[in-house]
Image (spheres, helix red, strand yellow):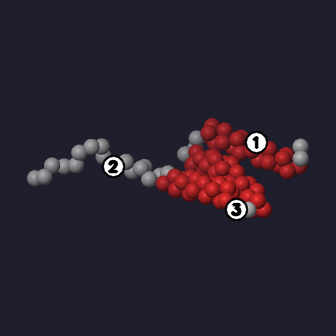
Amino acid sequence: MPPGPTGPPPNPRRDRQRALAAFLQGALVVATLLGIAALVVPEAVHRALAIAMVVVLVGVPVVRVGWLVVRWARRRDWRFVAAGTALLTVLALGLVLSFRGV
């Protein structure tokens, strides 16, 4: 009889964050390409690409916090839901105030 497998048993939760990891890697690639493109394009397009890169770099963590708030709500971890929601509220309020010129 051949020996059985060695090591720890497979973890059933191993792939639970695969979608988030793929999203973060994709955002990294997009931000890098935008940054490189902003360096080599004419001045007329440079500013738009640089702004798009900053939007990606600022927006990705906000999306991640939103994803975590949903995950914490599914697990009924209300303290973290409250903390994440408070953070997203402060960010949204800052965005609104910045567009109003305050």
Q: How many marks?
A: 3
Q: Cα distance, mark 1 to mark 3?
A: 35 Å
Residue with the mark numbered 1: 90
Q: Cα distance, mark 3 to mark 2?
A: 49 Å
- For the question of whether residue 96 can be seen, the reply is yes
Q: Earlier in the sequence, mark 1 or mark 3?
A: 3
Place of residue 53 in the rendered image (x, y in percent of width and height, measured from the top left): 68, 54
Look at 74% across and 58% down and name the residue there.
Answer: 46
- Three-letter amino acid code of the residue under disc 3: Val
Residue with the mark numbered 2: 10
Residues at marks 3 and 2 touching, judged by CB atoms closer than 8 Å: no
Look at 74% across and 44% down and name the residue there.
Answer: 91
Q: Earlier in the sequence, mark 1 or mark 2?
A: 2
Residue with the mark numbered 3: 41
Place of residue 75 in the rendered image (x, y in percent of width and height, measured from the top left): 55, 45
Question: Element at badge 2?
Answer: loop
- For label 1, count other residues whose C-alpha is less than 10 Å away and answer few (under 14), some (14-19) or many (20+): few
- Three-letter amino acid code of the residue under disc 1: Val
Residues 46 and 73: in front is 46
Question: Element at badge 3?
Answer: loop
- Three-letter amino acid code of the residue under disc 2: Pro
Place of residue 27 in the rendered image (x, y in percent of width and height, measured from the top left): 59, 55
Residues 98 and 53: in front is 53
Q: In the figure, residue 25 lies in which quadrant?
A: bottom right
Which label lies toward us, 1 or 3?
A: 3
